[in-house]
Image (cartoon, grey):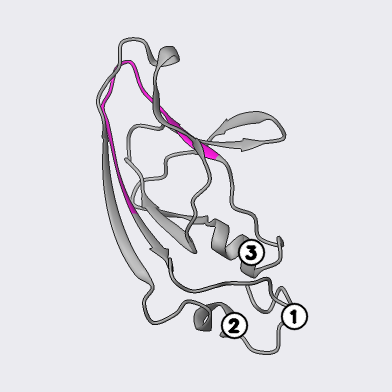
Amino acid sequence: MATLLELNHDDYFVDQPGEKAETNVRCSYYPQCPRPELVFGLKPHCDGTILTILMVDDNVGGLQVLRDGVWWDVPTIPRTLLVIIGDQTEILSNGFFTSPVHRVVTNAKKERLSVALDYVDHEREIEPSP
């Protein structure tokens, strides 16, 4: 990422979080919902993190990303991890990398499970790269 931004050293993003950065794990269970058009699994949002690593359900979709005013389904690929850029990385990259608006929709026939690991520094003041 630092190379793409033509920064002086490749460890720019590694060096930005302070020593008090936190790693949090969030497990989310979305039961089947008979009327998914009425219920969000998780409302539209951006992650306020440096990044989020998401282990999605191998069999049930539900994660969507907003692009150009259209909600796109994120495909489920078994045994993969999805990396989502957070707001802190968007700020650090001066907007080069963007924190996507995303949501989770429910499924009428199947339950869904996801595990999210996020990395965030609540105490350090961050600023855009030069």
Residue with the most extreme top position: 35
Check disc 3 and report the residue beneath it: 91
In the image, taking residue 26 as reference, residue 40 lies left or right, namely right
When asked about the image quadrant of residue 97, the answer is bottom right
Packing grade of label 1 (10 A; few <14, some 14-19, many >=20) is few
Check disc 2 and report the residue beneath it: 12
Whether 109 is among the magenta residues is: yes
Packing grade of label 3 (10 A; few <14, some 14-19, many >=20) is some
In the image, taking residue 55 as reference, residue 98 lies left or right, namely right
Give the camera-side residue of 48 and 104: 48
- Where residue 72 appears, x then y in whole percent? 58, 32
Marks 1 and 3, the one that precedes in the sequence? 1
Residue range corresponding to the magenta coloring: 102-116
Quadrant placement of the C terminus: bottom right
Q: Residue at x 53, y 57 (%)?
A: 86
Circle 2: element type: helix
Task: Determine the CA span between mark 3 and mark 2.
Answer: 13 Å
Q: Nearer the viewer, mark 1 or mark 2?
A: 2
Residue with the most extreme bottom position: 9
Task: Determine the CA span between mark 1 and mark 2.
Answer: 10 Å
- Where residue 125 appears, x then y in whole percent? 54, 73
Check disc 1 and report the residue beneath it: 6
| Above or below, 74 relative to 118 | above
Instruction: Confirm or deny contact between disc 1 and disc 2 (CB under 8 A).
Output: no
Q: Residue at x 62, y 61 (%)?
A: 90
Amino acid marked by disc 2: Tyr
Circle 3: element type: helix
Quadrant placement of the N terminus: bottom right
| Above or below, 38 relative to 11 | above
Q: Residue at x 56, y 85 (%)?
A: 11
Circle 1: element type: loop
